[in-house]
Amino acid sequence: MAFASPAMEALATKAKYSKLVGIQLYSIREDLKVDPMGSLTKLAEMGYKYVEHANYVNHKFYGWPATEFKKRLDDLGLKMPSGHTVMGKLHWDDSKKEFTDLWKKTVEDAAICGQEFVISPSIDGSIRKDKSMLLKYMDIFNQSGELCQKFGMKFGYHNHDFEFSEKLDGELLYDLMLNNTDPKLVTQQLDIGNMINGGGVPGEILKKFPGRFVSMHVKDEILAATGREKYESTVLGKGVIDVLAMVKLGDSLGGTKHFIIEQESYQGKAAIDCVKEDLQIMKKWGYK
């Protein structure tokens, strides 16, 4: 008698998420290192219902195997519709022209956790320096989308700043990436904060590629006190980005369904207090 894998069982019961407000767990990364369960509990108690992981190491999420992590989230009333794992050279076997077991396991574990999107939050530096290599990896992105489809999911990419400052043969990296990926297979998670460090303008990108941004990292930025980047993130509504306008534009034009709060710098405040304030602001704006 054949038994379904946990990932296939998850696929049989998983429903697509409608519009939602969640949190990227990188926002409280230091808290999670000290007390992962306690930190997740605090998020649930302050009203978060959806989380996005940024820690999948050795087939574990924050130290827990997929089935155990999902159970802990379920016990708290939390869902995880998306997560970040960089897809790089270790995940593709060029000699066989197929994904390695490492990436296959990554996708399967994402399905077990009930994810809708498997998102790569960056791309290897050597890949983005060579146009032929980049285009090759955009094809691999499309193939990752096909793999994710088998589990009822979609593959996605999350930008940083370099996509809006680096060019290959005179074409902006981000344009190359979006023009060479199939929207039916690869979605985009637009980080409206990251991009301004590279000179990108969120409103312009949303208008240039309408309907391509199923997910958005909702983030505000202020001038950075130190560091290599010009801007650093801050509490929503306190910085230079018209966050509400970008959220509304994503809602009306970008095709955005997932609004994921992320704050990486805190200006002396506790991270957990910042993300509580961020959620309250989103609710005040009418997004829950």
Image (tube, helix red, strand yellow):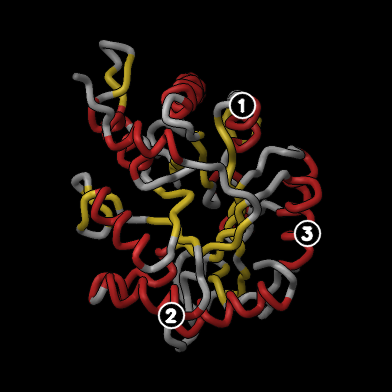
Q: In the image shown, does 99 or 192 lie closer to the viewer?
A: 99
Q: In the image shown, does 38 or 84 lie closer to the viewer?
A: 38
- Which quadrant of the rendered structure holds the N terminus? top left
Horizontal arrangement in the rendering, residue 274 relative to residue 182 (left or right): left
Residue 172, image x and y in percent?
Answer: 64, 36
Question: Disc 2 to disc 1, how far (Cα)?
Answer: 36 Å
Horizontal arrangement in the rendering, residue 110 relative to residue 224 (left or right): left
Residue at 47 percent of width and 41 percent of height = 14
Question: Disc 3 to disc 2, how far (Cα)?
Answer: 26 Å
Residue at 60 percent of width and 66 percent of height = 219
Residue at the far top: name it.
96
Residue 64, image x and y in percent?
Answer: 21, 56
Q: Could you tell me if the residues under marks 2 and 1 are in contact, i.e. CB atoms within 8 Å?
A: no
Residue at the far front: name it.
1
Q: In the image shown, does 218 or 38 lie closer to the viewer?
A: 38
Residue at 36 percent of width and 71 percent of height = 40
Question: Disc 3 to disc 1, how far (Cα)?
Answer: 23 Å
User: Which residue position is annotated with label 2?
Assistant: 271
Give the numbered dot on residue 184.
1
